[in-house]
Image (cartoon, rainbow, N blue to C red):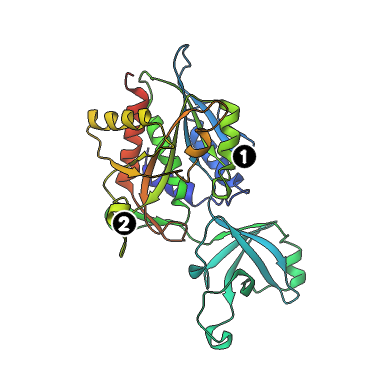
Amino acid sequence: MELKEVIFSLADAYGASGSETPAAKRACELLSKYCPDARIVSGNVIGSFGTKRDGLPHLVLDAHIDQIGFVVTSITDEGFVKFDQLGGIDRRLIAAQPVIIHGKRDISGVICSIPPHLSGGSEVPKYDDTAIDTGMSHDELTEIVSEGDSVTFDVKCRSLLNERVTGGALDDRCGVAAILYALELAQGRELAFNVTVVFSCQEEVGERGAKIGAFQLVPDIALAVDVSFAAAIGEDERKCGKLGAGPMIGVSPSLSREVTDGLISAAKTASIPYQLEVMNSGTGTNADRYSVNCSGCKACTVSIPLRNMHTPVEVIDLSDVRTTAELIAAYITEEK
């Protein structure tokens, strides 16, 4: 697998929460190589990996397929598109950003706001004070754009120095890529679990797809493969991961210590670099949904360090995606 090519292909497919179909179709196409029964169910991409064997625990590998974005709320008489956020977005970064409105066809636009010299200050504009300018009139827009259409940042993935890459939907398409690469590595090896893959929808608006997947599949163990904060300028490195230092294995009262220890053991046995991510409560990931499903399941997080989360310029190190995949493959094939 050409890992960077797969990540770029996934991250450049749009799929804001609730409108994941283009990204989900791309992920389903890639997953079908390893899971012949791959299909889209209730917005989630689901597939079974390997031959099912009686007596083995059922393990779900989950990564969310949706991305943060915006939703169209109205079109003004002057031809400006009003919008609101989908998922957590820092309003400080939205002014002057190029975007794509996904209507009956895609339309390019730019987010505009009242400039500081007219607004009387430099406060961060609220969504009510911003709009998308497409250059089209009200009548032209209403032929193509409807209330409820999704909007995403107009950005493509790019290579940086060494193995760093940047893009606007690396959260969590790099997690999807890590699972796909793990399946590549685990092909032909005896599995310690009956494995199901879920690329879940609507994580950014409340882990909704994971709730559906958890109740549909009722796994014994779930690994949520997501991203977490990598240290940047001005941050406390003790509270963040480090780019290039390997996957972050979750430690939390809401997670299974048994699975955490199993991942650590697998990493040590296979000489895979790893970091610990200590959380004192919930994780803010799909692991929180799997762990309380029905009678519960043993859940844990495996996170890829990422800078500039929920922005058009998220940054990851490809080596972390690679070692995350190696850890997952080692864990699901290791004798338990």
Is disc 2 placed on a helix, strand or loop? loop
Q: Is residue 312 above or below residue 36?
A: below
Q: Nearer the viewer, residue 185 or 253?
A: 253
Which residue has dot 2 on it?
A: 231
What is the quadrant of the C terminus in the image? top left
Q: Residues within 10 Å of mark 1 (few under 14, many from 20)?
A: many
Q: Residues within 10 Å of mark 2 (few under 14, many from 20)?
A: some
Taking the spot 30% from the left edge, 42% from the top edge, the residue there is 276
Residue 185 visible, this angle:
no
Q: Is residue 68 above or below residue 3?
A: below
Distance (Cα) linking label 2 and label 1: 33 Å
Q: Amino acid at mark 1?
A: Gly
Q: Nearer the viewer, residue 156 or 257?
A: 257
Rendering coords of residue 8 (x, y %): 43, 49
Q: Amino acid at mark 2?
A: Ala
Q: In the rendered view, does 102 fall on the left or right side of 58?
A: right
Which residue has dot 1 on it?
A: 43
